[in-house]
Amino acid sequence: MIKDITVEASLRDARGKNEARRLRRQGRIPAVLYGERKDSIPVSLNAKQISQILHSAAGHNTIFQVALANGAREAAMLVDWQFDPLKGNLLHTDLQRIDLTRSLRVKVPIATQGDARGVKTQGGLLEIVTREVEVECLPANIPDHIVVDVTELELGQAVRVRNLAASDRYRVTSDPEKILAHVILLKHEEEKPAEVVAEGEAAPAEPEVIKKGKQVEEGAEAEAPPKEAKAAKEGKEGKEKGKK
């Protein structure tokens, strides 16, 4: 969607991480402007202004004017960007020149409308499967979003790309059979407690403890073999008779 926004772009002579850090300290970010069979131009942009465009209703589909230092103005849109994963600061972006007289393909977000019947009366859950669809249109006709009415969806039913209302401003080019949203049944699985033993199952046997060490050895000595005990007794009696 074309917006009345102008972004001032300054040419970048230096490259590298040090130059990028210097720009960010000044509230600017490195960027590249390319496309439409023209040379790529390294530029720097106002980070806050680009962040506002990305978070607007049209988002990255916003078409705005880039004002160059030589006085030239070119229509462009954001095609790639990078945020700091920790701080959330915008680090870099790429801009593509746009010919306002030619159709282009862009991805547009899906917005659901209504309360699904399968959720209200059948205990189901509305699940959004596809959040963007591709459309082909002139730059001035890019929609902010495409509305999908889910009011009549019952349990087990889905709305697909082919169910979207036709428009004379754009043509949807995504797979017609792709599911956008459906109503599914919530499943509640009961987990079996670990300490409960099912009926018919044998309880696990306790491990047998085998005593080892000194106690076993002492027991072996205390129980002498019968033959050795008898021989010791006879020898003792013989010695007592010899003394008499």
Image: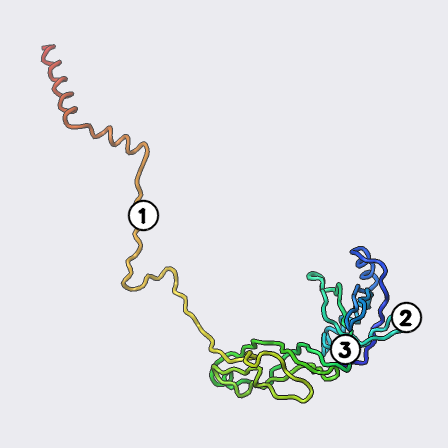
Which color scheme does this rendered protein use? Answer: rainbow
User: Where residue 66 appears, x then y in whole percent?
Assistant: 83, 73
Labels in figure, total: 3
Q: Secondary structure at mark 2?
A: loop
Which residue is denoted by mark 1 in the rendering?
Answer: 207
Distance from disc 2 to disc 3, alpha carbons, whole Å, reads 21 Å
Residue 193, position in %: x, y?
Answer: 39, 63
**Contact check, label 1 and label 3, Cβ < 8 Å:** no
Residue sticking out furthest to the right: 70
Amino acid residing under circle 1: Pro
Q: Is residue 115 shown above or below 91?
A: below
Q: Residue 77 vs residue 14: left or right?
A: left
- Of helix, strand and loop, which one carries label 3? strand
Which is in the foreground here, disc 1 or disc 3? 3
Q: Residue furthest top?
A: 243
Residue 72 sits in quarter? bottom right
Contact (CB < 8 A) between labels 2 and 3?
no
Give the mark, 1 or 3, whose residue is nearer the N terminus. 3
56 and 14: which is toward the camera: 14
Q: Amino acid at mark 2?
A: Asn
Q: Amino acid at mark 3?
A: Ile
Q: Which mark is residue 63?
A: 3
Nearer the observer, 17 or 120: 17
Between 172 and 86, the one lying in front of the other is 172
Residue 42 is situated, as x and y percent measured from the top left of the image, at 81, 64
Task: Give the residue at x 37% y 60%.
Answer: 195
Position of residue 57 in the picture relative to residue 173 (left or right):
right
Q: Residue at x 80, y 55 (%)?
A: 18
Camera-near label (2 vs 3) is: 2
Query: Mark 2 = which residue?
Result: 70
- Mark nearer the N terminus (2 vs 3): 3
